[in-house]
Image (spheres, rainbow, N blue to C red):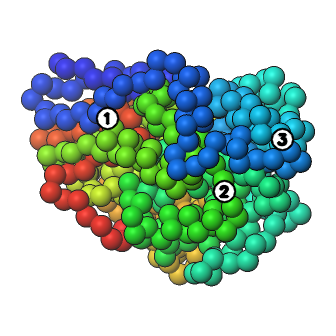
Amino acid sequence: MPSYAVPNGNRMIDVNLPGDVEVTVVNNKPMPVMPDVKQAVRDAILHPVASKRLSGMVHPGQKAAVIVTDVTRKLPEEIILPLLLEELQAGGIRPEDITFVVATGTHRPNTKEEMAAMFGADLVSRLRFVNHDAWDAQGLKNLGTSRTGIPLVVNRHVAEADVRISTGVIETHLFAGYSGGVKSLAVGVAGETTIAATHNYEMIKRTRLGMIENNPFREFLTEAAAAVGLDFIVNCVQTGKKELVQVVAGDPVAAFQEGVRTARAMVEVELDHPGDILILGVIYPKNRDLYQATRAANTSVFGPSPVVTKGGALLIPASCGDGFGKPGYVDWMSRCNSADEIIRSACDNGFAPGDQKAVILGWILQQARIVMTDCLIPPSDLARIHLESAPRLQQAVDRELQRRPDARVVIIPDALLSLPIVSGRRTAGETP
């Protein structure tokens, strides 16, 4: 009986499938990885895309804000930040005039221990690192509105800096098409009112994974970053194992677009047909809570074409040791009796930032069932939000094949990074 390995965080789970079952494994296209990460980062920073070197853009006496990722992202910032610091100091900016702002968006604050692990203990002990707080009125600055009426409210450290830099990772993203570029400024350090206005029902139903062209969410990000004045980015393209494929630095739009070309070449993979059973791997750290882990299901419905059949099953092995993540979506989904009711409630009443997860899961549940496996959240708690469960992935697979012996199985080992597209069914437009 053929065996397949699927990740749950840093651990691999083996699952056996009968030899007569049609199985398709969706792997990202192999890309060469950088053998020397530090040298790759240095080369990118010293040879930026469509931009002067950072040291030539700054002057003594200026204040700099460096927007860095939070604990839900993983990239080599312990290498990136010291090299950025070198460039800023070479241009005359003193370390005490630099503030590193953790782009939490509406996520929880990161602890000092987490910051030390991500950015380097020495750097965190010597320099100023602050968590962004989207609800702290005194820590925010109102810069007016966008051309479509979205409030431009951003972190005060960032708004009042003379120079603004951001780090990030370029990977598929449900609203932005691909994360990275200007997103860390326009969302990661934005105020709650801005995040609410960009994560509403009308906005998100017009976006798709991998779509950066004609994307109203991405258009707002670009406008907001131009209004605030994002000067320089350092973004990484990585494999699912977080191996470095490319570093781009420089102009926030041009460098981002160069990175997207690489990311697309790696993650956009054609399928011959949709699957009836999808097995969706979740690589660390996205398996830490349900809010992040269920992003693995997004690729099944919100890509350029659906890759799961109507009524199919989405099996997600994820430990979720940190529980549900943000609680708002859980309360909302548990009050609704069905996926249809979740969507009606969102359309009629709107929702707070973070609660868009309920709408996303509602849309997915209209297409397929979600089955969590190897999960520490009690099955009864999962059932309250209309998710099924099984103790182990193998048990879930066996159960689904008993229901439908002729099912086609699609395995996506890195479901948060891969973007499968059914041949000839690439679509654009609104989410149904």
Around disc 2, counting alpha carbons within 10 Å, would you say few (fewer than 14), some (14 to 19), or many (20 or more)? Answer: many
From the image, tell me which residue sits under label 2: 230
Q: Position of residue 61 (x, y in %)?
A: 89, 48
Question: Which amino acid type is shown beneath numbered disc 3?
Answer: Ile
Dividing the picture into quarters, in which one does residue 427 lie? bottom left
From the image, tell me which residue sits under label 1: 28
From the image, tell me which residue sits under label 3: 93
Q: Earlier in the sequence, mark 2 or mark 3?
A: 3
394 and 260: which one is in front?
A: 260
Q: Name which residue lies at 52% across and 18% down.
A: 36
Residue 289 in view (yes/no):
no
Q: Earlier in the sequence, mark 1 or mark 2?
A: 1
Q: Position of residue 73 (x, y in %)?
A: 59, 39
264 and 304: which one is in front?
A: 264
The Cα–Cα distance between marks 1 and 2, rounded to whole angstroms, is 31 Å
- Looking at the rendered image, the disc whose residue lies closer to the viewer, 1 or 3, is 3
In this picture, residue 20 sits left or right of residue 58: left
